[in-house]
Image (cartoon, rainbow, N blue to C red):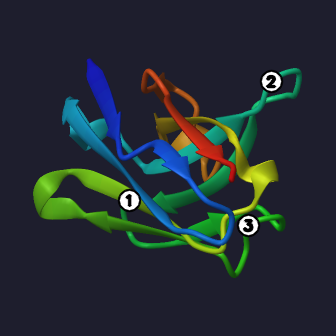
């Protein structure tokens, strides 16, 4: 019922910046929050940032100050601006959406994932 399509991943040098986009379609009225998770090889999937329909945000401590999540309600799109990227930021980044039951850890719907590689 809800489809999420990510874009913007790729290869970037350490210290560089990248902006990920996620467009939602379908039953968007059911979405309370959207967010970004990431999963590096051999590691658990972790929440990077989330934002509610009202603009409340939640960030992982590891990215706080370097990443900004935002939304464009007219386009049903959320963005993740990542600056000062480090090699440890390398992961597959997944867009997510959730109902109020999942709060600021949206996990009811998932995008296909987009690869972010930070390397020289």
Query: At numbered mark 2, what does the secondary structure look like: helix, strand or loop?
Result: loop
Mark 3 or 2: the one toward you? 2
User: For the residues marked 3 and 2, what is the alpha-carbon distance in whole angstroms?
Assistant: 18 Å
Which image quarter holds the N terminus?
top left
Camera-nearest residue between 26 and 14: 14
User: For the residues marked 2 and 1, what is the alpha-carbon distance in whole angstroms?
Assistant: 23 Å
Query: Contact, CB < 8 Å: mark 2 with mark 1?
Result: no
Residue at the farthest right position: 42
Q: Which residue is mark 2?
A: 41
Which callout, 3 or 1, points at the residue further toward the start of the chain?
3
- Coordinates of residue 36 in the picture (x, y in percent): 55, 46
Q: Residues within 10 Å of mark 1 (few under 14, many from 20)?
A: many
Q: Quadrant of residue 72?
A: bottom left
Q: Residue at x 68, y 53 (%)?
A: 120
User: For the residues marked 3 and 1, what is the alpha-carbon distance in whole angstroms?
Assistant: 15 Å
Q: Residue at x 13, y 55 (%)?
A: 75
Query: At numbered mark 1, what does the secondary structure look like: helix, strand or loop?
Result: strand
Q: Which residue is mark 1?
A: 79
Q: Quadrant of residue 49?
A: bottom right
Q: Residues within 10 Å of mark 2 (few under 14, many from 20)?
A: few
- Coordinates of residue 117 in the picture (x, y in percent): 62, 42
Q: Quadrant of residue 106?
A: top right
In the image, which disc is placed on residue 114? none
Which callout, 2 or 1, points at the residue further toward the start of the chain?
2
Camera-nearest residue between 11 and 49: 11
Camera-nearest residue between 78 and 18: 18
Residue at the farthest front position: 120
Mark 2 or 1: the one toward you? 2
Q: Which residue is mark 3?
A: 63
């Amino acid at each position: 019922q809800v489809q999420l399509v990510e874009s913007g991943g790729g290869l970037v040098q350490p210290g560089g910046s990248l902006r990920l986009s996620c467009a939602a379609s379908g039953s968007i009225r059911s979405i309370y929050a959207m967010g970004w998770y990431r999963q590096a090889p051999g590691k658990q999937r972790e929440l990077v940032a989330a934002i509610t329909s009202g603009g409340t945000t939640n960030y992982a401590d590891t990215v706080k100050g370097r990443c900004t999540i935002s939304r464009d309600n007219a386009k049903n799109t959320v963005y993740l601006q990542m600056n000062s990227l480090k090699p440890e930021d390398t992961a597959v980044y997944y867009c997510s959406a959730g109902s109020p039951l999942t709060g600021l850890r949206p996990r009811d719907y998932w995008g296909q994932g987009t690869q972010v590689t930070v390397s020289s």
